[in-house]
Image (cartoon, grey):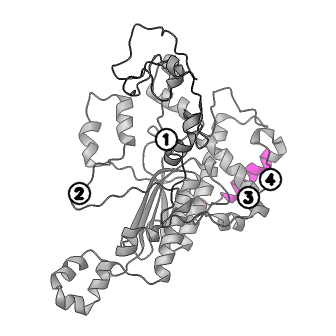
Amino acid sequence: MAASASTPHTTDFPAEGRCSYYVEKKKRFCRMVVAAGKRFCGEHAGAAEEENARKRILCPLDPKHTVYEDQLAKHLKKCNSREKPKPDFFIQDINAGLKDETEIPEQLVPISSLSEEQLENLIKKLRKASEGLNSTLKDQIMSHPALHDALNDPKNGDSATKHLKQQVDGKHRKKNSVFERLQIDIQHLCLNKIPLLSKEKLPVVGIGKHLCGVATDLALRCLVETYAASCEERNEEPLAKRRKNDKTDKEINPLAKEGNEKNVPEKWTPVAGIVIALCCHHRCDWRHYVGKEYFRALGLGAVDFHYFQRMSSWATCGMRKTFLEASNVTSKRKDKHSDDSEEHDDGGCRITDNSTESLPGLLTVEEKKKIGHLCKLLIDQGRVEYLQQKGFSPALQYYTDPLVSLENVLLTALPNHSSSPETSA
């Protein structure tokens, strides 16, 4: 156990009806509810003298919790970690992409183990492949009116303001809106098997907030290949448009036809748009990457991709230091707190002024940042090319200030026939 049930180093007592086990690490009593007549919760029952005769073991389905050995069979039938029936919209690896084992070596040495010559060759390849790419993206920083009052409130300090800017307003439910949450890995999600979408043939807008690394590629393939391609193959139209073209329905219910027609574009598309906040390129995976053809056209392959995605973390490896300096935070707070409350990690990269991560060639921090940004740009350009090939007009742009997040690039895409103004990447 993580702590003992001995007399705690505190004058506090457990709350009534709560577990009497003192968690040393948290310096407080366990807050779990206990059964009638018991002092300890099920997890800490072994600490009670009357329970010592019974043995608790780790659950074989999830070692994060324990269970009485003599009740294991009963527990396995109701454990939350047991395998549950798969829904119809679960199709194993439908968005994973083709697995090409011949291209991925079994073991690659870390960047820190590369020779100076090997690293220089990688960087030369990167710079050559990035020639002609626009590294200066357009600023498209916008703010919802609902946040204006809070953002301009003088009572909010820098941290509170930054937190507000990172928030996504989930309180936008309308009276006639339908919300459904699907708990499934994007890798296995088949959108056209979702009852609501398959019945109504609704156009989809894909929105992703910080879809870390490989999740972006899985989401793009889920939208563009799994859903859009499937609908187009069957020449399916949305329910409202079918009514528009149905003369019998028009004669029977002209009001319904008139109301629905307003919301249906002449050129219907299964995917009406895509908006994804990009991040964590170091968590990309060659198998799932949608820009393989783009890389191959540049003479690059799986090994190059592997090192480029690892080096992409250099772009944000100064994240902690940069924000602290910009906010003039005290040195005490630097040591104790992580100031940039992103949902993603930094690829294990923490750089100080005198650190070069033991890399050959002794690259400076600024050089590493520039290389990291080039890696991100090249990986994202592969996604842009993929969307263009699939009939979309994609664009990369900045959606927030780097002081709010260094992961501040947004990927947007509209179908080519959209009436909205098109932007180029």
Return the x and y of residue 290 as percentages of the image width and height.
Answer: 61, 64
Secondary structure under badge 3?
Answer: helix
Q: What residue did someone put label 1 on?
A: 343
Q: What residue did someone put label 2 on?
A: 174
Residue at mark 3 to residue at mark 2: CA–CA distance? 46 Å
Secondary structure under badge 1?
Answer: loop
Return the x and y of residue 300 as percentages of the image width and height.
Answer: 73, 61
Closer mark to the observer between disc 1 and disc 3: 1
Secondary structure under badge 4?
Answer: loop
Is the residue under label 1 in contact with that under label 2 (CB below 8 Å)? no
| Quarter of image, res 28 | top left
Return the x and y of residue 272 as percentages of the image width and height.
Answer: 40, 69
Front-lying residue, 222 or 408:
222
Q: Is residue 282 above or below residue 193?
A: above
**Which numbered disc flags the more N-terminal residue, 1 or 3?**
3
Q: Residue at x 38, y 36 (%)?
A: 163
Front-lying residue, 405 or 265:
265
**Amino acid type shown at disc 3:** Ala
Q: Does the magenta-highlighted stretch encompass residue 42?
A: no
Q: Which residues are magenta?
A: 119-133
**Which numbered disc flags the more N-terminal residue, 2 or 1?**
2
Return the x and y of residue 97 as percentages of the image width and height.
Answer: 63, 65
Q: Residue at x 76, y 42 (%)?
A: 110
Q: What residue did someone put label 3 on?
A: 302
Residue at mark 2 to residue at mark 1: CA–CA distance? 28 Å
**Which numbered disc flags the more N-terminal residue, 3 or 2?**
2
Q: What number is the disc on residue 106?
A: 4
**Amino acid type shown at disc 1:** Glu
